[in-house]
Amino acid sequence: KAERSLNFIEQIVEEDIASGKNGGRVHTRFPPEPNGYLHIGHAKSICLNFGLADKYGGQTNLRFDDTNPVTEDTEYVESIKADVRWLGFDWENEFYASDYFDQLYAFAESLIQKGLAYVDDSTAEEIAAQKGTPTEPGTPSPYRSRSIDENLDLFRRMRAGEFPDGAKVLRAKIDLASPNMHFRDPIMYRIKHAHHHRTGDKWCIYPMYDFAHGQSDSIENITHSLCTLEFEVHRPLYQWYIEKLGIFPSHQYEFARLNLTYTVMSKRKLLKLVNEGHVSGWDDPRMPTISGLRRRGYTPSSVREFADRIGVARRENLIDVGLLEFCIREELNKSTSRVMAVVDDQPIKVVITNYPEGQTEIMKVENNPEDPSSGERDVPFGREIWIERDDFMENPPKKYFRLAPGQMVRLKGAYIIKCEEVVKNDAGEVVELRCTYIPESRSGSDTSGINVKGTIHWVSVAHAVEADVRLYDRLFIVENPAADERDFQELLNPNSLVTVKGLVEPSLKDAVAGERVQFMRKGYFCVDADSTADKLVFNRTVTLKDSWAK
Ligand code: ATP
Ligand code: MG
Ligand code: MG
């Protein structure tokens, strides 16, 4: 694999190592909020954080950023851990921001004691008005000049639960004229009488993201705290708290978040898709979640490869989902067996009239021409076979090389057949083709001298195994749904899931959930968790070619 050049974060890390900053130590963290399942954007962040530590002999913490009791849940914590592991990474420590609530509270008191924080009784609207506008300075709250003792007393009473939600907040006393709006006395703590999934009812005040994140980094001695670009304007505040508290100077660096075409990435919107029933759950194979991709048939290595290819930059962009599909297609091309599956709600039965009734012949079919070590497998052939309706045309155009009246085609791994007669029902639909086969044309020992241009796949009627085949496509019909004013309903692709009947070769009879194959000429598929001994269920991971390419 070609060496790629260093990304800007690797450059920073190498400079820091060279200059001996932090003793040459590299310690990153991945800090999900447990308020939803991880998505492919998080995968980018995971690969970046864990990848840096791996590359430079450092460590990565998994830290749950669980400072908002209302939206967080243990179910999410468990799914996040499973997804990070599945991607192939292991964390040095598992931490929770909520474990730092006592320490963060002590930090807040120390800022009050330094005259750098005050309790404000203003309402949310009043505080917003006090902040001013980007072009006009803010105005001080009437509570800004409270004494240190009064602030300490009130803050302790906030913690003790004496006040209802929203009655008071703790604000940092910084600079109401700062051009950076985040410096205009940002809120540090708010009152929320809410049950927390880990700390229970111990707390009724909770720290804001800005007051929790940098300090959590610092407590863990994180050297390189990586986050997405929208936090760039928060960085001065991140540094201000660390500096005023005199604690370990973690440093924040920002990179462009991943945006992907034809999907949405925000957890709030993904939750809406789940709650409104547009998808079957967080792990619906159409979801851009890691659990959805896994169920769709993606491999961890294909997701890591994708993360590597998109790289890390400081400019926002929108990545073509075709690149993600390319990564899995490339990998599955090398790793999967080619099997035959007739995927059609109305397949056509072909009867080979000159083939002995009741006879079964075992054909040897190569598993994967890309991988000589993959060997061959047995595929039974008989007098009656299924083919797809698309592989026959009664009145074909000139360059149609599949089956047509009087025309010959090769059956993959078997014989050349010729269509002699078309049988129709009363409605005029084709229900059966009566064909003859050329006995000398058996694949591998063909002495017939006949050259046919087309090869089609087939499945023996006597041996076919029934399956449901779920054909997944893009969830949205517009490239960038997040930027579209219209409601979800109008943007969703009505054909994002089409379930079709499948008749698959018997080698798949005992296939288990997660198994991946290529259905010849159709695409890459994997066995879904819904599969049972009675009914196989396949998910289409990706088509053989990019059918959306212009
Ligand atoms: P969302 O907006 O989807 O809810 P979030 O940023 O609120 O995402 P967190 O759980 O806080 O979700 O994210 C954990 C980490 O993953 C953060 O460091 C965040 O910057 C990173 N991250 C989230 N979304 C993306 C993305 N699209 N691309 C790259 N990194 C991301
Ligand atoms: Mg977040
Ligand atoms: Mg969020």
Image (cartoon, rainbow, N blue to C red):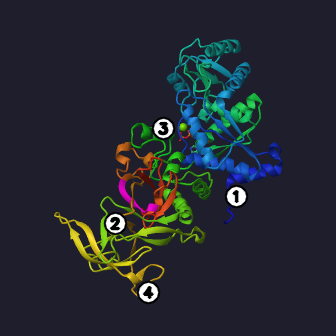
Q: Position of 122 compared to 249: left or right?
A: left
* Secondary-structure class at tag 3: helix
Residue in front for this viewpoint, 453 or 377: 377
- The kind of secondary structure element at disc 4 is loop
The residue at which mark 2 appears reads as: 388
- Residue located 51% across and 58% down the image: 516
> Label 3: which residue?
268
Sooner in the amino-acid sequence: mark 3 or mark 4: 3
Q: Is residue 486 visible?
A: no
Q: Within 10 Å of the Cα at label 4, are there few (<14), some (14-19), or many (20+) other Cα atoms?
A: few
In the image, the residue with mark 3 has its CB under 8 Å from the nearest atom of ligand 1: yes
Query: Separation of disc 1 and disc 4 at Cα?
Result: 58 Å
| Quadrant of image for the N terminus | bottom right
- Residue 174 in the image, given as x and y percentages of width and height: 66, 27
Distance between the alpha carbons at the discs numbered 3 and 2: 42 Å
Taking the spot 75% from the left edge, 28% from the top edge, the residue there is 245
Label 1 to label 3, Cα distance in Å? 34 Å
Q: Circle 1 sits in a helix, a strand or a loop, which is it?
A: loop
Q: Position of residue 142 (x, y in %)?
A: 58, 17
Residue 444 picture location, percent across and down? 48, 80
For residue 198, what is the image quadrant? top right
The numbered dot on residue 447 is 4
Report the magenta residues as a range.
499-506
Is residue 373 on the magenta stretch?
no
Is residue 407 placed above or below 308 in the rendered structure? below
Q: Nearer the viewer, mark 3 or mark 4?
A: 4
| Cα separation between marks 3 and 4 | 64 Å
The one nearer the camera, 118 or 46, is 46
